[in-house]
């Protein structure tokens, strides 16, 4: 049905724009039905996205000025994760939930902490350096330095329950802590200053399933029960995959996307990446491609069966590692060094040697190379005019995959 403007009083789009009707209809639609409705026309999609997935409206619960907060979030290279990100994608609301922001320890933590106190009226109530008690806790917290909690009352005068924002300070890029240590698949979602990412949209939003991602331990029992009560079926194997119905090397139709130890690009087709409106939000220096073209891999252990990677006794884990180079301004991630990131590493090592020879005196260049057993990880003061290749990564990825 085509919209004819203000006179198409009985048009479907017109009806869905009327708040009482729209609110009533969407209350009974699941995510699959909503996304199918979005596919009917670009106009519908725009209307539905602005109604259901308005990030500024969702953030108003915690921040007086959501666009200013998102500017600060971008400057700090922070990622909103945890239950807030899941609520955003699933159109749920849990009044008791906090807002968690993962960001690298250092300047970013100072930027965002200062913003919360000075611009939003929060008070720092806890600065917790993490202490590892046992092996399970070590695995979970290995990428986290500390957690800083900020709080304020909802109405500003202390008579209502607290709002809490937690800054989770990480050792490396915050995406490593999110993908590498989260315990179940439904919470592997995050929001940057201008995009929202749902890593397992089929399982999480279409099938309402969540698959454990860490070794079972007593600490996780209450966490798994929490998401069971919130509507996600905790599966040790996915029931929405029929063995032999898909090419698993490509991840066709599988609820978790690409499996069998194949690298997945964070901004790739298996991820639901939603662009967010950026009016009034100042962009940060770090380009989107750093996150979009980083990757990870799903590892299946415990007797993998080619026709069903989640057969009984198998366990899925996420592998994600830091990729860095003196020729890159920003940290990227990989799941497996081969084949793409191995190619990138070879190119960047050659670039590094070339730059050292042309932009530094010979004795200094030779000293850096000879004393660095891992040349891609060596630290030194870059001379003026040092060339960074971060903008080459997307081009290299597209060209590499076109020929492989």
Image (spheres, rainbow, N blue to C red):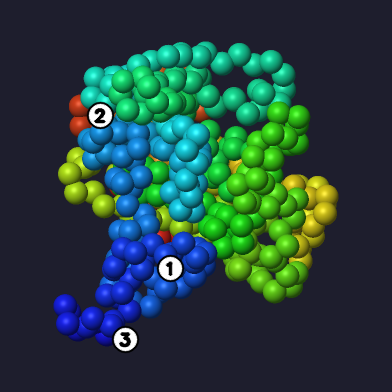
- State left or right for residue 154 relative to residue 201: left
Q: Which of label 1 and label 2 is nearer to you?
A: 1
Percent across and percent down for residue 215 are 73, 36
Classify mark 1: helix, strand or loop.
helix
Q: Residue at position x 47%, y 38% from top?
A: 95
Q: Are marks 1 and 2 in contact (CB under 8 Å)?
A: no
Distance Cα–Cα, label 1 vs label 2: 64 Å
Q: Are marks 3 and 2 in contact (CB under 8 Å)?
A: no
Q: Residue at position x 16%, y 78% from top?
A: 6
**Is 121 or 130 nearer to us in this picture?**
121
Residue where numbered disc 3 is placed: 1
Distance Cα–Cα, label 3 vs label 1: 18 Å
Classify mark 3: helix, strand or loop.
loop
Q: Which of label 3 and label 2 is nearer to you?
A: 3
Percent across and percent down for residue 357 are 31, 30
Quarter where residue 2 is shown: bottom left
- Residue 134 to residue 249: above or below: above
Percent across and percent down for residue 311 are 79, 57
Q: Residue at position x 27%, y 75% from top?
A: 14
Residue where numbered disc 2 is placed: 359
The crowding category of the residue bearing disc 1, from other C-alpha atoms within 10 Å (few below 14, some 14 to 19, many at least 20), is: few
**Is 287 or 126 nearer to us in this picture?**
126
The crowding category of the residue bearing disc 2, from other C-alpha atoms within 10 Å (few below 14, some 14 to 19, many at least 20), is: some
- State left or right for residue 99 relative to residue 56: right
Q: Residue at position x 31%, y 20% from top?
A: 157
Residue where numbered disc 1 is placed: 25
Label whose residue precedes the other's in the sequence (3 or 2):
3
């Amino acid at each position: 049905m085509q919209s004819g403007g203000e006179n198409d009083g009985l048009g479907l789009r017109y009806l869905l724009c009327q708040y009482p009707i729209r609110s009533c209809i969407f209350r009974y639609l699941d995510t699959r039905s909503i996304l199918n409705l979005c596919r009917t026309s670009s106009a519908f999609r725009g209307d539905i996205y602005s109604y259901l997935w308005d990030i500024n409206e969702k953030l108003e619960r915690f921040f007086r000025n959501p666009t200013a907060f998102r500017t600060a979030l971008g400057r700090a290279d922070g990622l909103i994760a945890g239950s807030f990100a899941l609520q955003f994608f699933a159109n749920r609301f849990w009044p008791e939930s906090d807002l968690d922001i993962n960001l690298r320890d250092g300047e970013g933590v100072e930027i965002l902490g200062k913003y919360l106190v000075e611009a939003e009226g929060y008070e720092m109530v806890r600065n917790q350096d993490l202490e590892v008690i046992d092996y399970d806790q070590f695995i979970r917290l290995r990428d986290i330095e500390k957690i800083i909690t900020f709080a304020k009352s909802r109405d500003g005068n202390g008579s209502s329950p607290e709002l809490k924002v937690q800054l989770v300070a990480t050792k490396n890029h915050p995406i490593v802590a999110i993908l590498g240590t989260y315990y179940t698949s439904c919470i592997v979602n995050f929001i940057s200053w201008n995009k929202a990412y749902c890593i397992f949209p089929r399982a999480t939003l279409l099938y309402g399933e969540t698959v454990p991602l860490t070794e079972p331990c007593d600490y996780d029992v209450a966490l798994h029960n929490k998401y069971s009560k919130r509507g996600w079926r905790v599966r040790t194997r996915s029931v929405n995959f029929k063995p032999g119905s898909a090419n698993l090397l490509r991840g066709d139709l599988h609820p978790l996307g690409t499996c069998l130890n194949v690298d997945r690009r964070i901004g790739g087709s298996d991820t639901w990446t939603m662009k967010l409106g950026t009016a009034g939000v100042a962009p940060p220096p770090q380009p989107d491609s750093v996150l979009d073209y980083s990757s990870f891999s799903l590892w299946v252990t415990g007797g993998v069966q080619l026709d069903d990677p989640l057969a009984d006794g198998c366990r899925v884990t996420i592998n994600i590692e830091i990729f860095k180079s003196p020729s890159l301004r920003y940290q990227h991630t990989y799941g497996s060094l081969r084949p793409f990131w191995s190619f990138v590493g070879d190119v960047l090592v050659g670039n590094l040697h070339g730059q050292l020879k042309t932009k530094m005196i010979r004795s200094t260049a030779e000293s850096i190379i000879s004393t660095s057993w891992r040349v891609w990880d060596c630290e030194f003061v870059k001379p003026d005019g040092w060339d960074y290749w971060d903008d080459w990564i997307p081009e290299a990825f597209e060209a590499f995959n076109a020929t492989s």
